Image (cartoon, grey):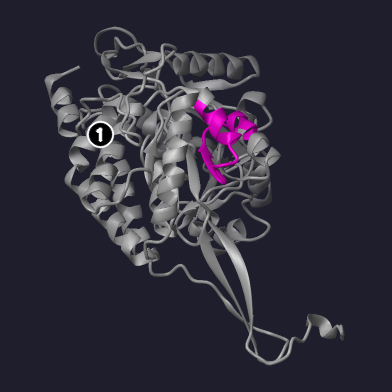
Amino acid sequence: MSLAIKDILDHLHINDINDAFSTGNQWGSSANAVTKDIVSPTDGKKIASVKYATADEYNAVIETAKKAFKTWRQVPAPKRGEIVRQIGELLRENKKQLGTLVSYEMGKSLQEGYGEVQEMIDICDFAVGLSRQLYGLTMHSERPEHRMYEQYHPLGIIGIISAFNFPVAVWSWNAALAWVCGDVCIWKPSEKTPLTAIACQHIAQEVFKRNNIEEGVSCLVIGDRQIGELMSNDTRVPLVSATGSTRMGKAVSAAVGARLGKSLLELGGNNAIIITENADLDMSLIGAVFGAVGTAGQRCTSTRRLIIHESVYEAFKQKLVSAYGQIKIGDPLDENNHMGPLIDQDAVALYLDSIEKCKAEGGRFVVEGGKLEGGAYSSGCYVKPCIAEVENHFKIVQHETFAPILYLIKYSDLDEAIELQNGVPQGLSSAIMTNNLREAETFLSYAGSDCGIANVNIGTSGAEIGGAFGGEKETGGGRESGSDAWKVYMRRQTNTINYSKTLPLAQGIKFDL
C-alpha cells in the first residue's frame, strides 16, 4: 500500500476500522470473531484487516436502530432532507479521496471511482427535493360528507446488502431515499469491499452527530454471508434491499418471503446492444466498448452481447478488433488506463473457465482472452478483454459472466434481433443503435425490449439517478434510485374520514339497529 493510500485512509478517518459505529462498541468482542484481510486487486497488497460482527453484535445494532427509528420518524421530512443535503456536501468535500479508495479497493478505473461518488452526491440532491414531495392521493368518496385520501408512512429498519462492483453508490441509492422517508438503515457491504463502506459510514455519522441525531439512523455491520442470512430472516427488518447474483437474490427472496416481508432485488444482467443497419457505427463503438470493458465487465449493466445486423456485421467487427487493440490495462489509479483488474483471483478463474466453455460450445474468438501476469500485473487479477462470435442459445451466453467477455451475434431483421435480445433469463438493461425512428420506437414498444431499462443510441451501462433503476425476470423486478422508487421504502395507508352526522355504509349496504 502506497503512502498516498495511507494518507487517504487517515483523511477518511479509517483508523479504528473495527468500530461498530452504531453501538459505540468494538467488533470482535467475542472470542469467536473472524478477522479478514482486505487486499487490493490493484497491486495485491493488504490494505487493512477487519473483524466480522457476530450474531450478538448484529442484534445489538438492530436494537439500536429500532430505538432510533422511533425518534427519526418524528423529524419532519424536509428536516430529514436537510440532513441528507449536508451528507451530500460532505461527500463533495471528500470526493477525490473516497473515489480513489473505491478505485484502489475494488479495482475500477479512477474516473469510474470518482463517478461512483458523484452518483452518491446526485442521489442526495434528488432526495433533498423528494423530502418535500412524498405525495399521497385524494379520492372522491361515494358516500356524502366523506373524504378519502392516501398517505405514506415509513416502514422502519431497511436492510441493505450491497455488492463489490458498486461498493458505495448502491447503498446511497437506498439510504438517501429511505432516510428522507423516515426509515433507518442497516448496511451489510460486500465482504470484498468493506473499507469504502466504513468511510461512508463515518461521513454519514459525522453529519448525524452535528445535527444531534442519536445513533442508529445509519448503521453498518461488517460480516460475511451469515449477516445477510440473519437480516433476511429477521422480522424486525420489514424491507431487505439486496444487490448481487441471481443465486443470492433467490435465497434472500425465499427467506424474506417466508416471513411475508418485502424485498427489493437488483440481480444479474445479460445485456445486449442491437446495432442496426441504420446505426452510426462510430458512436455505437464507444457505447459497446465502454459497456464491455468498463469496470472490467463487472457491472450488472455491462454489455455482454452485441446483436449486429448482417449488412454491417463484418465492418463493425473490424472496428471492435481495432478498438480492443488500443485498450490500456493496468493500475486503475493511472488515468491513462482504460481497464483495471477483476476483483480477485476467484473472478479470474471464473473468467478463464467461461472462455473454455465458450470454445467448447463452438465459440470463435476474434480477440483472444487470457490472464496477464508479472510486473504491473503481479496481483494476479488482471485479464485481457476478449470477443467471441457465438450463438445466442449457447449455455455460456445465457449465463451472466462477470468479466470482460463480449459475444457477437448476427441477425437479419429487427424482429429476430428483438427475439435474440429478449432470449435470455435476465432482463436488466438493453439498447438499440439506430437512426431509424421506426426501429427505435419498435424497440421501446410493448413488442420490443423486455428489460427494465431500454435505451436508444446510448449503451447499456451508465444510468442516471433521475430514472428508476432495475429489471425484470431473473434481475429481480426491483426499482431503486429515481422516479417514484421512494414508495418501496414506505407503507401505504388509505384513510376515510366521515364528517357527517350519520354512518352510511359503502355499496349502499343497509344495517339498521
Crowding at dot 1, Cα within 10 Å, few <14 / some 14-19 / many 20+, comes out as many
Q: Is residue 374 left or right of residue 503?
A: left
For image coordinates 52% across by 33% down, the residue present is: 244
Give the answer, above or below, for where 240 lies relative to 447: above
Q: Quadrant of the N terminus?
A: top left
Q: Nearer the viewer, residue 461 or 249?
A: 249
Specify start and end residues of the magenta stretch as a single range.
227-251
Instruction: Please state which of residues 13 and 98 is positioned toward the viewer in this rendering.
Output: 13
391 sits left or right of 509 in the view = left
Instruction: Answer whether residue 107 is visible to the viewer in this image.
Output: no
Q: Hey, which quadrant is residue 476 in on the image? A: top right
The residue under the point 43% across, 28% down is: 190
Q: Residue at x 15, y 28 (%)?
A: 10
Magenta stretch contains residue 237 = yes
Work out which quarter of the rendered image holds the C terminus and state it.
Answer: bottom right
* Residue type marked 1: Leu
Q: Is residue 347 magenta?
A: no
Residue 118 drawn above or below residue 336: below
